[in-house]
Each structure stands twice: as structure tokens, then as C-alpha cells.
Image (spheres, helix red, strand yellow):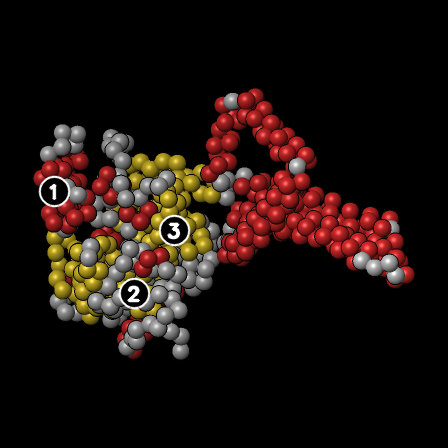
Amino acid sequence: MPEIHALKTDQPLALPGEPQPSVDDVTRRLYEAAQPSIVKVETTKDGGVGVGTGFAVTRPGLIATDYHCVAGAKEIKVRLPNGDFHRARIKDIDDINDLAILELEGTPPPSLKPLPLGDSSKIAPDTRITALGHPEGLSPVYVSPGYHVTDVRFGNKLFGNLFGVTPENYLAKDTLTPKDREDAKAVIERQLMYTRVHIRPGNSGGPLLNNEGKVVGICDITADPEKFSHSLFTPVSDLNKLLNREKPKFQASYAYTGEAWTDSYRGALTNSPVFTATGTGLLAGGAYLGLARSSYARAAGVWGGAAYGALSLPEDAQELCNSTNTRDKLKYGTASLGDLSMLTGGAMRLGARPLESLMMRSAAQEGSLLSSLALRGAESTLVKSTLSKAGRVGVALLAVGAAVKIGSDFIPNRLVQTDLSRTDTNDIRPPFPLYGRH
């Protein structure tokens, strides 16, 4: 029977590979039924990367999570339980109740089944509940058994803890419009489920289940930053309202692009083509002359290229295996070929000259007939030509691999958000700024 990773109330987080807390039969049943529907939400933002949790809802391809998990995200990846990933778009946002619905690119696997939604109003105090998610971004899905305490208002204390300012001071800002104040007041009046369930950063957006395995809440925040077992969940009724909203409140625009640096290079090439092309040529020419004139530079280049290929190949190959669309397969397949070419070319170049030197030294050690014959063999045109060709082929493979690797960065596989606007054309504000800052 597989080990289940658990986060129990007031117990420390046990990392994968460490002994995990035991779970009862009810927790095991809930975990085994829901775990295939839980995903990890990985985001790329201007300030770095983020990780949260999500789960499949209503129909294949839709994922529910917290808005603060994807707020400000340039890219969103949804990592499935089997390691595969789908790129995702924001379908709609509830910026007041901190919820978001994502839509996967491509066809989701049949194993990613929507979780049934329950009724949070029927959860009485001391009712057993169970949360699932990716605490600290850990790859295994963790299960967190606990119980419901009561329903609470978001209120002044939470507002101050999260945003560092009292509601009164925030509402008193001169820069707020009437709609801004209306939204802020709505956040303050939010009703949340207060529980004794252990959650951690990374759990956000995961489901809270009742004993029937139905979703009754969505993991949101901790009630006390120093007590992770005092946690708050958004009632599933708010998620139902978002899913059933006829017209999305927000519209996200996306475009496919290559790696981030390629966007900058393309922009420079468009805005200053002569300067950029000249700079590129000078850089390439300088690198070539440096390698041609300096044996140390050549050795460093060969070692560096081979090492880079060796380090990048496993990661690119893994991403290739986990890709679920043609764009990613093309990008990571090309990158893997570049890595392999650099690794192979570097190994050939590094191995050719030492082998030749070794043969020469071995043959010259003694003046015997055998040594003399070996020396003449080592000096023969065939041996020298073969080793020389191997070295040149290695350098060529190294150069081709580097070019292919750089070229793979230009393949437009990244689904990047270019805009997020309200569908109400009379309301040009961004999403509620308190969540938008996260």
C-alpha cells in the first residue's frame, strides 16, 4: 500500500523521504479518490516564480484555484499528478473572493476528473474535513485532516495582517474611486470557513473535502501567520457563483513567444536593426577570434559546452517527456538535441588529443623494437588523421549543438499573458489591487 504524505494539526511538515504520519481509513479513502484530480499551479512572474494548488472542476480542462496564486503571472503551467504539464489561460476571476478559473491548453487526460462540489453551509462546528494540496510546492500531494470550527468574517484583523494597513486607513486614501472603496468593503465583509487544518504556502487553491469527498471549500490563507493549523477556506458557494457566472468579469489576452531573452532581442532587432546586427556580429567574431588564438579559451569553451550539455540534457529530456502539446515537444525536443550534440562533441574533442598524447608517450618510453613500432604507428598518418578528424568533428558538433540550443529558445511555445482587463468597458480598473500585488 503506497505511503500517503500527511500534514496533521500542530505537527511539523515531514519532507518526502522522511517517515510520514499515519492516516486512518477515511482519510486514505478521500485521498485516493481525490488525488488524481489535484494539480500543481506553477507561475512565472516579473518578480520570480510561484507555486500553488488547483483542482479539476465541472468539465474537463477547467481548474479552480486562488486568484492570488496567478495574480500578475506572465505564464501559468498546470502540472498533473503524473508529471505532465499543460499551459493554462485565465478563464475568469473573482477578485473579491480570491478565486480564479483556469482553462488548460490541449486535451486533458481522462484521469483528470472534476471533483464533485458540495454544500459548505451544511458543515457544522467540529465536522471532520480534509484538505489536499502542495505545501511548500512539494511534488507529492499532501492530505491534511482536521475539523471545521466556525464561519468568520474576513474583517479588520485579517486585512491588517495580510496587507499591512487597517481597513480604515486604506479606505481613507484619496486615490480610491467609489468603486475601489466598494470592492475593499466587499473584501472586508468576506465570509470564510475557519478551521483547524494544517496548511502551508503552496496549499493555496487546493480543495477542502467533506467525508463524502465533495468540495466544500478552497484553501485561502492562514488565520495566524505563526500557526499554520489555524486556516481559512473560501466557501464552495463562492466558487459555484464564479462557475455559473454567465459573463466573465475579466478577459485575459495571451500570445505565444520564445524564451524571455528572445523577446528582448527581437525588440532590439526591430527597433535598431543595424546596431543590433552589428553588435551580434562583433560579439560572435570576437568569440571566434578568442577561441582561435587562445588554447586556454578553446579548452574552457570545450569544457564549458560539454558541461552545459550534460547539465541541461536531463531537464530538457524530462520536459520533453512531460510535454502535452506540439509546441513544447518541438521546443524541448530541439533543445535536447542541442544538449546531446554539445555533450557528444565536447567528449570527442576532449578525448581525441589526450589519447594521441598518451599513445605517443607510451611508445617513446623505451627504445625497444616494440616501442619503436608503436611510436611509428602512433605517428602514422592514419592514426594522426583519425584523431585529428575526431577532434574537428567534436568541435563542429559542439558548435552546431550550441546553435541548435540557442535556436530552441526562439521557438514560440510559451503562452504569455499580454493583458488582463474587465469586460465592463466602462470600468478600466485592473483587478482588485490588494490581491493584484501578490
Q: Is residue 210 left or right of residue 101?
A: left
* Residue 430 in which image quadrant: top left
State the residue in front, 22 or 436. Answer: 22
Residue 388, compared with residue 148, is above or below; it is above
Q: For the residues carrying marks 3 and 2, which lies nearer the camera in this image?
A: 2
Q: Do the residues labelled 3 and 1 touch (CB within 8 Å)?
A: no
Q: Which residue is drawn at 10% across and 34% down?
A: 172
Check the picture and name the quadrant holding the N terminus: bottom left
Disc 2 residue type?
Leu
Crowd around label 1: few <14 · some 14–19 · many ≥20 (10 Å): some
Label annotation for residue 13: 2
Crowd around label 2: few <14 · some 14–19 · many ≥20 (10 Å): some
Crowd around label 3: few <14 · some 14–19 · many ≥20 (10 Å): many
Label annotation for residue 42: 3
Q: What element carries label 3?
A: strand
Check the picture and name the quadrant holding the C terminus: top left
Mark pair 2, 1: CA separation? 32 Å
Q: Which residue is drawn at 12% across and 42% down?
A: 166
